[in-house]
C-alpha cells in the first residue's frame, strides 16, 4: 500500500493568518506535538518575512530531530539564503521555494514572462539544491496555470534538482475532478521520473480543501500539505485531522496509508486552540466538541446497542481523552469543570451546576460516566444557553 507523506504547515501557512501568530516558545510547543503526531514534515516558517520567523525556524530545527523541517523562500537568492540560515541546525532540512506560474500572477503580480519564470526556477532551485540536500518547489497558483506551461515548469524544477513538486490550489478555486486530472497529466508527462514526489496544497475558499486533497491523492499525489484545525490564509487550508482520518477510515477503498498517530489528533487540536485562543466550531469534524455527541433518542439507543450504528470513528481512536469518572457525593465540581474544559467547553457557574446535577444522576445509575456521556450532557446543557442567547438577540 502506498504511503502519503503528511507535510504540516500549521506553523507557516496557519501561523501567518490573522489571529494565529505564535511566539517562538509557542511554536516549539506546537512542533513537539506535531512530532508526537507523526507528521513527516513540519514547515516551520518563512525566514525572510521577519526576524521572529527566522528565530522560530531556528528554534524548531534545534528541537525537532525525527521529522523533516522545512523553511519557505521565494525563488530569490536573499530569500533562499535566509531560509538556509534558519535551517542550519536541522537534522533533516528541506528548502521549500516557490514561484507563481499562472499567467494572471506572472503578468499582474510579478511582471515576468513565462521564459523569465522558467529561468528563475532553474537558477534558484539549482542554487538551493547546491546548499540543501532536499528541495521542494511549489508552482504557486498551479491549478490556474496552463497545463502545457505547468509541465515545462515541473521539468525545469526537476532538472534543477527539486525532488518534491507541489502543485497548490492556492486560491481554493479547483474542483476535485479537474484537480485530480492536473496531477494525472503532470505524472504522465514526467513519465516515471525517479524519486520525484508530487504534492498537493489546498485552500478551503469553496469548502473543497479536503475533497481536493483526496482528489490529488487519487490523481497520484503522495504528499499533502495540511494544517491542524484547518487554519491558514483566508478560509484556511485543508484540515489535517479530517484528511488523515478520512484516509484511515476509508483505507480499504483508497488504498493509501499515512504515518500519523490518529490518537494524537485531539491533543494537537486542543493545544493549538489553547495557544491561539481560537476555538474550533462545536460541529467541526473529528475535533469539534459535538463530533461524538449524540442527541436524538434513536441515535443514543443505537449507540448503546452498537456504536457502529451511528459512529464511523470512535472518539478514543482520535484521542478524545478516555474518562471513567465515578462521581458520588464527595466528588467535586472542579474535577468536572476541568473535564469539560478538556473536551472544549467553558461552562458558566449555572451550567456547571446543571452538568454536575446530570452527571451525578448518571453516576448514581451506572457508576461510570464516559467521555461520550459527558459530551452528550455538555452538548445538551450548553445548547440551552446558545438557544437563549439567540432568542435574546432577536
Ligand atoms: Zn497556502
Image (tube, rainbow, N blue to C red):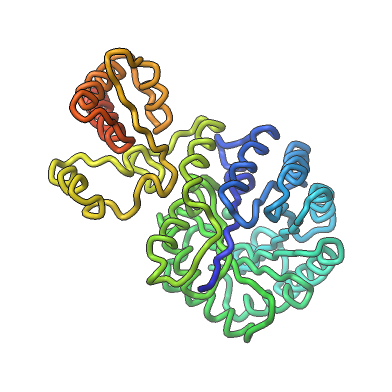
| Image coords of residue 20 (percent x, y) | 57, 37
| Image coords of residue 217 (percent x, y) | 49, 69
| 153 to 12, vertically: above or below | below
For image coordinates 64% across by 33% down, the residue present is: 26
For image coordinates 74% across by 57% down, the residue present is: 74
Q: Is residue 38 visible?
A: yes
| Image coords of residue 28 (percent x, y) | 67, 38
The one of 195 and 86 positioned closer to us in this rendering: 195
Q: Is residue 394 visible?
A: no
Return the residue found at the far left.
298
Q: Is residue 3 left or right of residue 352?
A: right
The one of 31 and 11 positioned closer to us in this rendering: 31
- Is the C terminus in the top left, top right, bottom left or bottom right quadrant? top left
Q: Quadrant of ligand 1?
A: bottom right
For the image, the number of numbered tags is: 0
The one of 331 and 145 positioned closer to us in this rendering: 331
| 378 to 250, vertically: above or below | above
Quadrant of the image occupied by residue 332: top left
Quadrant of the image occupied by residue 389: top left
For image coordinates 43% across by 47% down, the residue present is: 318
The one of 179 and 325 positioned closer to us in this rendering: 325
| Image coords of residue 46 (percent x, y) | 71, 48
For image coordinates 76% across by 69% down, the residue present is: 121
Amino acid at each position: 500500500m502506498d504511503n502519503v507523506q503528511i507535510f504540516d504547515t500549521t506553523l507557516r501557512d496557519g501561523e501567518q493568518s490573522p489571529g494565529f501568530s505564535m511566539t517562538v516558545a509557542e511554536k516549539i510547543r506546537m512542533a513537539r506535538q506535531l512530532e508526537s503526531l507523526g507528521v513527516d514534515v513540519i514547515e516551520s516558517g518563512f525566514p525572510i518575512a521577519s526576524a521572529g520567523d527566522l528565530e522560530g525556524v531556528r528554534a524548531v530545527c534545534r528541537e525537532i530531530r525525527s521529522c523533516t523541517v522545512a523553511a519557505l523562500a521565494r525563488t530569490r537568492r536573499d530569500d533562499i539564503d535566509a531560509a538556509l540560515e534558519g535551517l542550519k541546525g536541522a537534522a533533516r532540512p528541506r528548502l521549500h521555494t516557490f514561484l507563481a506560474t499562472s499567467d494572471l500572477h506572472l503578468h499582474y503580480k510579478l511582471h515576468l514572462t513565462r521564459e523569465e519564470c522558467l529561468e528563475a526556477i532553474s537558477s534558484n532551485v539549482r542554487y538551493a539544491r547546491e546548499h540543501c540536500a532536499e528541495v521542494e518547489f511549489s508552482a504557486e497558483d498551479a491549478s490556474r496555470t496552463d497545463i502545457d506551461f505547468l509541465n515545462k515548469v515541473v521539468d525545469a524544477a526537476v532538472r534543477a534538482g527539486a525532488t518534491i513538486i507541489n502543485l497548490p490550489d492556492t486560491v481554493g478555486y479547483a474542483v476535485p475532478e479537474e484537480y485530480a486530472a492536473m496531477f494525472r497529466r503532470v505524472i504522465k508527462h514526467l513519465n516515471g521520473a525517479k524519486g520525484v514526489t508530487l504534492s498537493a496544497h489546498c485552500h478551503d475558499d469553496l469548502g473543497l480543501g479536503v475533497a481536493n486533497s483526496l482528489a490529488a491523492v487519487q490523481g497520484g499525489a503522495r504528499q499533502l500539505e495540511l494544517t491542524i484545525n484547518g487554519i491558514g490564509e483566508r478560509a484556511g487550508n485543508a484540515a489535517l485531522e479530517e484528511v488523515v482520518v478520512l484516509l484511515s477510515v476509508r483505507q480499504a477503498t483508497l488504498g493509501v496509508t499515512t504515518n500519523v498517530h490518529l490518537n494524537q489528533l485531539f491533543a494537537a487540536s486542543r493545544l493549538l486552540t489553547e495557544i491561539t485562543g481560537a476555538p474550533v466550531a462545536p460541529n467541526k469534524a473529528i475535533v469539534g466538541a459535538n463530533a461524538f455527541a449524540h442527541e436524538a433518542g434513536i441515535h443514543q439507543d443505537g449507540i448503546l446497542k452498537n456504536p457502529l450504528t451511528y459512529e464511523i470513528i470512535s472518539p478514543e481512536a482520535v484521542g478524545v481523552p478516555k474518562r471513567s469518572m465515578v462521581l458520588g457525593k464527595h466528588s467535586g465540581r472542579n474535577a468536572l469543570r476541568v473535564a469539560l474544559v478538556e473536551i472544549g467547553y467553558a461552562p458558566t457557574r449555572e451550567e456547571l451546576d446543571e452538568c454536575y446535577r446530570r452527571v451525578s444522576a448518571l453516576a448514581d445509575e451506572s457508576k461510570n460516566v464516559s467521555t461520550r456521556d459527558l459530551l452528550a450532557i455538555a452538548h445538551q446543557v450548553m445548547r440551552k444557553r446558545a438557544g437563549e442567547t439567540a432568542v435574546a438577540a432577536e
